[in-house]
C-alpha cells in the first residue's frame, strides 16, 4: 500500500508481449509483487513496428487476450501512443516497470526525468537474458529454412 493506506499502489508494465514466454511472465509476476493493482500495457502492432522496425508475429487482439488472462494482471490496456506520460494521464499509476536493460540508457534516463516530474516511480526488473521474443523469432526462422 501507499502511504495513504486507503489507496492501492497501481503499477504499469508496458510491453509488446509477442510470442509470450517466461521472460514476460517473470516481469508481470515481479511487477505484481511490488504493487496492489497491475495494469499491463500491450503495445499496438503499429507502435511495435515503429519502435522495433517490424510488426509482432502475434496480432494485437491475441496478445491482449493472452495478457488479460495472466493471473498477475488486474487490467490490460492497449498502448497506442509512444508517450508514456500520455498513457499515465489516461490510466494513472504510481510506478512503471521496465526491464533492467533500460537502466542507465538514454531511454531509461528520459523515462526517469519525465515521471520524476509527476511523482511516478520507475522500477527496473531483472531482464530474462536467455529468453526473448527476438531469440524465439530467430530460432523459428532457422527451423523454417
Image: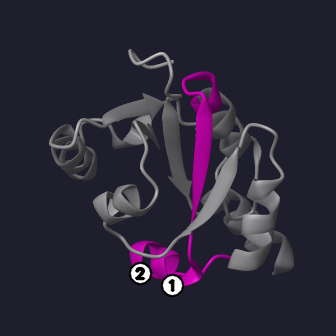
**Horizontal arrangement in the rendering, residue 48 relative to residue 33 (left or right):** left
Nearer-the-camera pick, 126 or 1: 1
| Residue found farthest to the front | 6
> Measuring 40% from the left and 19% from the top, which residue is drawn there?
4
Horizontally, residue 17 falls left or right of residue 102, namely right
Residue 92 percent coordinates (x, y): 42, 50
Q: Is label 2 in contact with label 1 (beta carbons under 8 Å)?
A: yes
How much space separates mark 2 and mark 1, taking CA atoms? 6 Å
Label 1: which residue? 46
Report the residue at 69% width, 31% height from top: 29
First to last magenta residue range? 31-56
Examine the rendered structure and indicate whether residue 124 appears above or below residue 39: above
Does 117 sit above or below residue 60? above
Mark 1 lies on a secondary structure that is helix
Measured along the vertical axis of the image, is residue 83 above or below residue 54? above
Residue located 45% across and 72% down the image: 52
Residue 49 is a magenta residue: yes
Q: Which mark is residue 50?
A: 2
Amino acid at each position: 500500500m501507499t502511504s495513504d493506506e486507503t489507496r492501492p499502489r497501481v503499477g504499469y508494465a508496458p510491453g509488446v508481449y509477442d510470442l509470450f514466454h517466461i521472460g514476460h511472465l517473470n516481469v508481470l509476476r515481479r511487477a505484481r509483487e511490488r504493487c496492489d493493482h497491475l495494469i499491463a500495457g500491450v503495445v499496438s502492432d503499429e507502435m511495435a513496428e515503429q519502435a522495433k522496425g517490424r510488426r509482432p508475429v502475434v496480432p494485437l487482439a491475441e496478445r491482449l487476450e493472452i495478457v488479460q488472462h495472466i493471473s498477475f494482471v488486474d487490467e490490460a490496456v492497449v498502448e497506442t501512443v509512444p508517450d508514456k506520460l500520455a498513457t499515465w494521464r489516461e490510466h494513472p499509476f504510481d510506478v512503471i516497470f521496465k526491464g533492467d536493460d533500460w537502466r542507465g540508457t538514454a531511454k531509461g534516463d528520459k523515462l526517469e526525468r519525465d515521471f520524476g516530474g509527476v511523482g511516478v516511480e520507475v522500477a527496473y526488473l531483472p531482464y530474462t537474458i536467455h529468453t526473448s521474443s527476438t531469440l524465439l523469432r530467430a530460432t523459428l526462422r532457422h527451423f523454417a529454412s
